[in-house]
Image: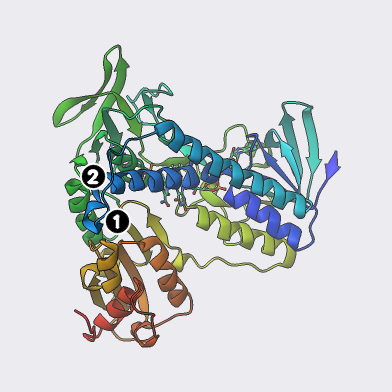
């Protein structure tokens, strides 16, 4: 039995960040990860490889369709998909190796193997090389993440009918890709393959895309994606998806079956607690399979904490990281905190969609009095020079106090622009605060300043 102050199960952004922060605070830390590389879903099969492909596919698309406008004439542009996939793999390798380096730097012991609880304060690691190893710690953090949600009737075959994991590595461009689910993954990976030449059809259960995002922004995004020739069938319930000798067939209620050569199932993710031994310490997951925790991330079992995708809240890497820091600080110092009111979200389509705080729909539902300032990217000089003028930025501020309650962006580099709004909201800024701060010209962040000024009818350039 090897003893530690803290054992973290799961080496994704929640788990590895918790391990590093706890080591910084002087704890003796081990991290158990069942995959050969650290970094979790995010680095291996999520955020990073998808963003690598989004960037490469956008460059391919731009080279084919966007350069002539700038007076840049190219010869025939062709796709080297295997080079594109190899670049993605190199980036993933570099980042996952980087986590190994950080673990060494902070003297965190890494165990390769599936970890499971075995009663209070005890963990067994089923190591492929060394057999079962026994660890003991007064503090255990469960950071085991999530996996793609299944859909009854959709027969995943790990190839033609697959999830995001397969869609990050198709060896050829599908002729026709059917995406089940019009959410983050559906539109990000749908965009990748659409830009590379596939016909993409998105089947979405609801009558809108991106449930939970501001509905006005989601409607405008849908129009843009349709202009990009992504086909949508909304309010469509998928009954089955099967592969046969000639391809795949997806059956839906209220519309004709769709034939295609690949299917991407992206209807959400489910917390991952398989063979984790929760029952040995009396932890009962909720109806959605999440591990219930209190505000200090403590489960019902003394000394056992949980963070990241395996607990409630948005399934986002930076949310998991914030919780990783907070739980380590709570364990080591007694105090740690996550401000859930200002967790940004970004969808890396073209244009990007980013948000922080309340949506306009939420403010209406909650009867919060608000004022709204909107500024379109077409009125911003930098957006014009970039040639990316679609979209808008919207600032929502309390009608009486002027405190910023939400910022929603559809437009170029929205994912970078949201950082200023997030920092402003974290400091409790008013729209006037943002509007009075000097912003460099000509830059995209000027749109945030102008939208903030528009809250009180003072935008200068629109
Ligand atoms: P994970 O990253 O899932 O890590 C959990 C780790 O625990 C895994 O490595 C797993 O192997 C390990 N594990 C599980 N059980 C055990 C066990 N018993 N023993 C040992 N190890 C175990 N989020 C963003 O914020 N931005 C994005 O751009 C983004 N893009 C995404 C794109 C895709 C295609 C996908 C699928 C997800 C994306 N996400 C994105 C979501 C993000 O990946 C997750 O929110 C994040 O990885 C959650 O972190 P985590 O540490 O909670 O879990
Ligand atoms: P999602 O929750 O974003 O979208 C799922 C979509 O599927 C929803 O629109 C939902 O209405 C729809 N749906 C559900 N059941 C359906 C059915 N039977 N038929 C048709 N449509 C159905 O989930 P996702 O796209 O699978 O992504 C999972 C999670 O991963 C996201 O919620 C997000 O937390 C994370 N993620 C984040 C990013 C990012 O931050 N850029 C990127 C990818 C994934």
Report if the beta carbon of the residue with label 2 is closer than 8 angstroms to ligand 2: yes
Q: Tell me the residue at 63%/49% (across/down).
A: 15
Q: Tell me the residue at 62%/62% (across/down).
A: 326
- Identify the image quadrant of the C terminus: bottom left
Label of residue 206 in the image? 2
Query: Does residue 459 show up?
Result: yes
Residue 95 placement (x, y as % from top left): 59, 47
Residue 257 placement (x, y as % from top left): 18, 25
Depth check, front residue: 119 or 27: 27
Q: Nearer the viewer, mark 1 or mark 2?
A: 1
Indicate the colouring scheme.
rainbow
Is 215 displayed left or right of 295 in the figure? Answer: left
Q: Earlier in the sequence, mark 1 or mark 2?
A: 2
| Kind of element beneath mark 1 | loop
Residue 415 image-quadrant placement: bottom left
Depth check, front residue: 207 or 279: 207
Residue 30 placement (x, y as % from top left): 75, 46
Residue position marked by numbered label 1 in the rendering: 351
Depth check, front residue: 163 or 54: 54
Alpha carbon of mark 1 to alpha carbon of mark 2: how far?
22 Å
Report if the beta carbon of the residue with label 1 is closer than 8 angstroms to ligand 2: no
Residue 308 placement (x, y as % from top left): 55, 51
Query: Relative to residue 349, is residue 174 depicted above or below?
Result: above
């Amino acid at each position: 039995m090897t003893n530690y102050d803290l054992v973290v199960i799961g080496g994704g952004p929640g788990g590895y960040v918790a391990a590093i922060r706890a080591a910084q605070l002087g704890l003796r830390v081990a991290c158990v990860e069942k995959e050969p590389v650290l970094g979790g879903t995010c680095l291996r099969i999520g955020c990073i490889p998808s963003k690598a492909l989004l960037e490469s596919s956008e460059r391919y698309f731009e080279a084919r369709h966007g350069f002539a406008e700038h007076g840049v004439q190219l010869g025939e542009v062709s796709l080297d998909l295997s080079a594109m996939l190899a670049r993605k793999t190199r980036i993933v390798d570099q980042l996952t190796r980087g986590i190994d380096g950080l673990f060494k730097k902070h003297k965190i012991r890494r165990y390769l193997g599936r970890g499971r609880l075995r009663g209070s304060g005890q963990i067994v690691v089923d190591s492929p090389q060394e057999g079962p190893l026994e660890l003991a710690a007064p503090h255990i953090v469960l950071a085991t993440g999530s996996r793609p949600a299944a859909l009854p009737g959709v027969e995943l075959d790990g190839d033609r009918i697959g999830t995001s994991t397969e869609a990050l590595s198709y060896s050829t461009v599908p002729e026709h890709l059917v995406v089940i689910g019009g959410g983050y993954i559906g539109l990000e990976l749908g965009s990748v393959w659409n830009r590379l030449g596939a016909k993409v059809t998105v089947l979405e259960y609801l009558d809108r895309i991106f449930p939970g995002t501001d509905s006005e922004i989601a409607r405008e995004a849908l129009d843009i994606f349709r202009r990009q020739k992504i086909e949508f069938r909304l309010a469509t319930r998928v009954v089955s998806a099967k592969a046969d000798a000639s391809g795949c067939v997806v059956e839906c209620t209220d519309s004709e079956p769709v034939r295609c050569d690949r299917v991407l199932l992206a209807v959400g993710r489910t917390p991952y607690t398989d063979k984790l031994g929760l029952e040995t310490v009396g932890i009962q997951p909720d109806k959605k399979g999440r591990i219930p925790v209190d505000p200090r991330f403590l489960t019902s079992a003394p000394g056992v904490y949980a963070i990241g995708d395996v607990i409630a809240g948005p399934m986002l890497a930076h949310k998991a990281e914030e919780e990783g820091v907070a739980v380590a600080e709570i364990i080591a110092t007694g105090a740690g905190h996550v401000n859930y009111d200002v967790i940004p979200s970004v969808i890396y389509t073209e244009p990007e969609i980013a948000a922080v705080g309340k949506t306009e729909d939420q403010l209406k539902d909650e009867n919060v009095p608000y004022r709204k300032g909107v500024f379109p990217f077409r009125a911003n000089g930098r957006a014009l020079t970039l040639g990316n003028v679609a979209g808008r930025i919207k600032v929502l501020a309390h009608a009486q106090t002027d405190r910023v309650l939400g910022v929603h962006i559809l437009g170029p580099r929205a994912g970078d622009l949201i950082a200023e709004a997030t920092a402003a909201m974290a400091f409790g800024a008013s729209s006037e605060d943002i509007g009075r701060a000097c912003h460099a010209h000509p830059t995209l962040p000027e749109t945030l300043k102008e939208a903030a000024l528009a809250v009180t009818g003072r935008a200068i350039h629109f």
